[in-house]
Image: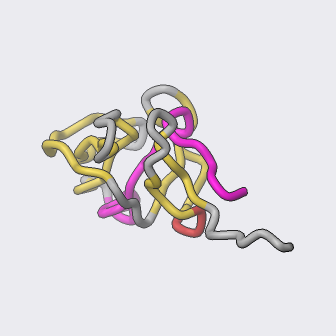
């Protein structure tokens, strides 16, 4: 009997809460606080912290930390505003750190 295969997902590495679909990855070439990170168009089952300005490798951005809604672990951040024109494409997108997420249904 064949197994039913669902969509490829990413989950919180601490509690396995589903946080994004593989199809929502925009880029795997980002840097987080603790190493490699992925840029996602959409995430789910998270809550967003307070907005703050941060000087990142690509300039000044207004960002808000992204937390798992189940275990409250910081998974990355949301780009709220980019101050440099070349970085505007990040606005409204999410960074999830590779070390904070795991693959599901691969």
Q: Residue 22: percent from the left, percent from the top?
A: 59, 62
Q: Residue 66: percent from the left, percent from the top?
A: 30, 45
* Stretch of the chain drawn in magenta: 85-106
Depth order, front residue of 38/22? 22
Q: Residue at x 62, y 69 (%)?
A: 7
Q: Residue 38: percent from the left, percent from the top?
A: 53, 49
Depth order, front residue of 102/76? 102
Q: Residue 1: percent from the left, percent from the top?
A: 86, 73
Which residue in the rendered view is the most extreme toward the right? 1
Q: Residue at x 58, y 43 (%)?
A: 102
Depth order, front residue of 47/84? 47
Residue 89 to residue 100: above or below: below
Residue 73 to residue 30: above or below: above
Q: Quadrant of residue 49?
A: top left
Q: Residue at x 62, y 53 (%)?
A: 104
Instruction: Tell me, yes or no, whether the highlighted magenta stretch contains residue 12.
Output: no
């Amino acid at each position: 009997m064949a197994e039913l295969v669902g969509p490829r997902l990413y989950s919180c590495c601490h509690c396995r809460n589903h946080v994004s679909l593989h199809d929502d990855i925009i880029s795997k070439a980002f840097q987080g606080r603790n190493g490699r990170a992925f840029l996602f168009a959409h995430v789910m089952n998270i809550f967003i912290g307070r907005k703050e300005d941060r000087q990142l490798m690509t300039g000044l951005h207004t960002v808000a930390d992204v937390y798992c809604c189940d275990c409250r672990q910081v998974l990355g951040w949301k780009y709220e505003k980019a101050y440099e024109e070349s970085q505007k494409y990040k606005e409204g997108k999410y960074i999830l750190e590779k070390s904070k997420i795991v693959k599901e249904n691969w």
